[in-house]
Image (cartoon, rainbow, N blue to C red):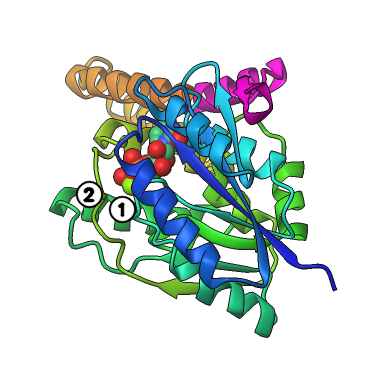
Amino acid sequence: MAKDKISIVVPCYNEEESLPVFYDAIVNVSKDMKGVDFEFLFVNDGSKDKTLSILREFAKKDKRVRYISFSRNFGKEAGMYAGLSNSTGDYVAIMDADMQDPPEMLKEMYKTLLEEDYDCVALYSSRHDDYTFLRKFFTSCWYKLIGIISSVPQQPGARDYRLMKRKMVDAIVDMGEYNRYTKGIFSFVGFNTKWIDYIPPQRVAGKSKFNFIKLFKYALEGILAFSTTPLVISAMIGLIFCLVAFIAIIVIIWKTLAYGDPVSGWPSLACMIMFMGGLQLFFFGIMGMYLSKIYLEVKKRPIYIAKETEKDI
Ligand code: UDP
Ligand code: MG
């Protein structure tokens, strides 16, 4: 029987310090997994450091190494899409280059897929000791919110580290949307996923590329991509306000006719106008955010542009 092949997809952005450590680790894992063929598919996401030249060196000395180098930085989501859509293995894993997704865990993950009835083994972290209080608070609020407003379940603390069977990978690649919130896509496609809890180690070198603003945008991305409830809520609130206004008009007309008091209440009126104006702008903003996603989607821009691959050397 032909050997199984595992593709390891590794998105890299300025990872010159982590890559040699990561490569050694993954090669060691491959030595322990003798019955399996490997493909190491690195995606250079427009790095400004020596990442690309390191990948060229890897590819020259190791035929299992492939790489796709982007023409600029397209983001980790695009990196994962490029990796998944170009992978050829029967199984595909996604791993960060910084050793926060320990390569040794792959052995256990592969064994699970062989022995148990799962299509995917994914990692999540239930503890976030390294997060600041604010990040912990916002993260837990986000998961509660998305649980209520989206029909696509999200595993709290989910990482992108996972090993999937080919069928699941094909389903993910078939979702060719431009605005990619991959954690949601993993969940949307279904398939049986086994979740393993672990504590991610510290980065082996370099710094995280995700600051507070980037994480906030990522969280918003997740909501816009997997829920239209904000639109429904704004429509409902609009309806409720119309009803309240209608009742208020009747009350005022009745009061004026009965007691004659035409000009009182200017301050409350001014406040109401401001409040309504603010609310309308807020809801227009929500609509605008969805509109901007449609705008980007219909343009059908490429998710990534490759400038070089291992075939070019
Ligand atoms: N990454 C990427 N493109 C980006 C940002 C990050 O390919 O624009 C890669 C990065 O090189 C790493 C992985 O995505 O392999 C996770 O990034 P990072 O470790 O900075 O994120 P964190 O672990 O802090 O969430
Ligand atoms: Mg990391």
Residue ID at (15%, 51%) = 132
Q: Main secondary structure of the magenta part?
A: helix
Front-most of residues 121 and 102: 102
> What stretch of residues is rendered in magenta?
286-313
Residue of label 1: 139
**Magenta includes 287?**
yes
Farthest-out residue, bottom: 115
- Residue 95 position, x and y percent, is 48, 52
Q: Is residue 237 visible?
A: no
Q: Amino acid at mark 2?
A: Arg
Q: Is residue 289 above or below residue 119?
A: above
Per the model, the C-alpha gap separating discs 2 and 1 is 6 Å
The answer as to whether callout 1 falls within 8 Å of ligand 1 is: no
Image quadrant occupied by the N terminus: bottom right
Residue of label 2: 135
Front-most of residues 22 and 162: 22
- Residue 227 position, x and y percent, is 56, 45
Which labelled disc corresponds to residue 52?
none
Packing grade of label 2 (10 A; few <14, some 14-19, many >=20) is some
